[in-house]
Amino acid sequence: MHKLRLFITTVSFSFLFLSAGAQQQSPYAGEWKGLMKDSITTFNYSIRITKIENGEVWGTGMSGNQTLYCETSLRGTIKNGRLSIRETEVVRTNYRNKDAVCLLELDVVEVKNKMLLGVYKPITNAASCLPGSFTLSFQEPVDALPKVEVVAPAPKPTPPQKPRELTLIKEIVIDADSAFVQLYDNGIVDGDMITLTDNDAVVFSNAALSTQALKHTISNKTTNTHSISFVADNLGSIPPNTGLMVITANRQRWEINFSSDFAKTSYVKVILRPRK
């Protein structure tokens, strides 16, 4: 996601001006909505606090971008003028592997004009998420939001898509039982996102290429031939989608530049040949 940019988030908000007597009538019962930004990607992010009672809060959190979406339930406490919120579970997401969603920790550094400004960092990093900053603005209180019956539109037929051409860029024979694979953006980090497959099995999906490696290990336990494909999920800000693959085994190292787009998917074939 940038890499997987879906967020199960731990949030700590410091409201120095929130008195204990105002907890039950907190103006923060409502929706905070804005953006998260790291060095590559911008994500939509919002928190909706629906209930505040006896110093505890409940609600939902939502995050995502144009292709990814994640909604979580959250619960927190107000104590000594400090509001702490933790998302407790994923309610729904369109990401294939829920366990790979990054956990993030957020800290507010300024509360001003009904806006929360702060920074965040990953506390779990299965998808190589990056630290960044966020800005959230206060929306209407939940009680004031009109109740609207939502009718889902009829699904539009999906036009048939041409299959992408598979292009072999290199075949490598390695005298080893296993090898370590790392993927990077090769040059300017421009938001390239890929789905990596190993013999048609998805290793990770919608993962962002950056200066931090995406990692995968291959072995000959089930097969000695691995076709590793780089499927472009977008073209980044500088098309096409490009990256660098680094393979290491037995103190040897191979570096392979790859390039994919919506018409072509490049792949590397790795044959693991055990030592005699």
Image (cartoon, grey):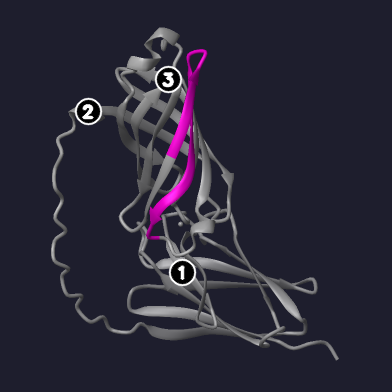
Q: Secondary structure at mark 3?
A: strand
* Amino acid type of the residue that numbered disc 1 sits on in the rendered structure: Thr
Does residue 255 appear in this view?
yes
Label 1 sits on a secondary structure element that is strand
Sequence-first disc among 3 and 1: 3
Q: Amino acid at mark 2?
A: Asp
Kindly report the distance in space between the C-alpha atoms of the residues bearing marks 1 and 2.
Answer: 42 Å
Q: Which residue is mark 1?
A: 195
In this view, the residue in front, 133 or 221, is: 221
In the rendered image, the quadrant that contains the C terminus is bottom right
* Residue 79, numbered label: none
Front residue of 133 and 26: 26
Element type at mark 2: helix
Structural distance between the alpha carbons of marks 3 and 1: 37 Å
Is residue 89 inside the magenta stretch? yes
Q: Which numbered dot is residue 110?
A: 3
- On the image, the x and y values in percent for residue 94 come to 37, 60
Q: Residue beneath label 2, please?
A: 143
Task: Tell me how far mark 3 sits from mark 2, CA to CA.
Answer: 26 Å
Task: Describe residue 268's horizontal placement relative to residue 222 as left or right.
Answer: left
Which of 37 and 50 lies nearest the eye of the viewer? 50
Residue at 32% across, 36% down: 34
